[in-house]
């Protein structure tokens, strides 16, 4: 299954309201099975970068961290109340 | 299917060599069906942030952009030759 089909299938199960959504997923796979300690800081900086491009309300950010064996998945979901492309 | 199971199934089909991999996925869904023009710049800045935490060789970065209807998926795959957590 491709990434595109995966997220298209996800989309169908969520509310069908036409809203703007931004989702950031960071997947970290360590060969030695350990997980790095910098992920929370990295996630914070990534959200800061995104907020320079899109107006983000902190209440609209949902963060989820999944871990299994050497695989770590950080998921940041952002619902955008209004689209505003602040040019850098 | 959860995100974790999706990426675990992906992992199995790829090479079984124990290497460190970092994957950044940015999913953008626009209610009005249009796609924003800032994604390439946003992607560049996100990779810059990541490179502050992990040593990245530009040759090891694979970028893929998938688009279908109002869904846009930007995928950045990074293979890490060595782990070096440069503390910010």
Image: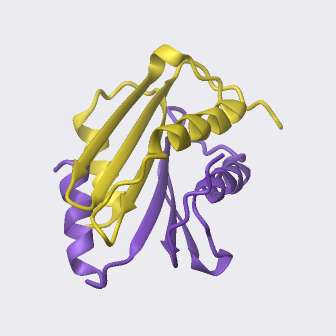
Chain colours: A yellow, B purple
Determine if residue B29 is in view. Answer: no
Determine if residue B19 is in view. Answer: yes
- Seen in the picture, residue B78 relative to B71 is either above or below; the reply is below
Q: Residue at x 39, y 56 (%)?
A: A27
- Seen in the picture, residue A43 relative to A32 is either above or below; the reply is above
Q: Quadrant of residue A3?
A: bottom left
Picture coordinates of residue B12, whole percent (x, y)? 20, 75
Q: Residue at x 34, y 54 (%)?
A: A35
Picture coordinates of residue A26, whole percent (x, y)? 43, 51
- Seen in the picture, residue A11 relative to B16 is either above or below; the reply is above
Horizontal arrangement in the rendering, residue A59 relative to residue A30 (left or right): right
In front: B8, or A22? B8
Query: What is the residue that sits farthest to the right in this orientation?
Result: A88
In front: A25, or A87? A25
In front: A75, or B55? B55
Horizontal arrangement in the rendering, residue B71 relative to residue B34 (left or right): left
Q: Residue at x 65, y 30 (%)?
A: A51
Picture coordinates of residue B74, whole percent (x, y)? 53, 57
Picture coordinates of residue B64, whole percent (x, y)? 53, 68
- Seen in the picture, residue B32 relative to B4 is either above or below; the reply is above
Q: Residue at x 26, y 70 (%)?
A: B10
């Amino acid at each position: 299954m491709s990434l595109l089909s995966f997220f298209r299938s996800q989309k169908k199960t969520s509310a069908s309201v036409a809203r703007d959504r931004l989702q950031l997923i960071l997947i970290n796979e360590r060969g030695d099975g350990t997980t790095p300690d910098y992920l929370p800081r990295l996630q914070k900086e990534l959200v800061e970068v995104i907020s320079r491009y899109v107006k983000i309300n902190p209440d609209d950010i949902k963060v989820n961290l999944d871990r299994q064996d050497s695989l770590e998945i950080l998921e940041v979901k952002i619902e955008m109340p209004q689209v505003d492309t602040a040019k850098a």
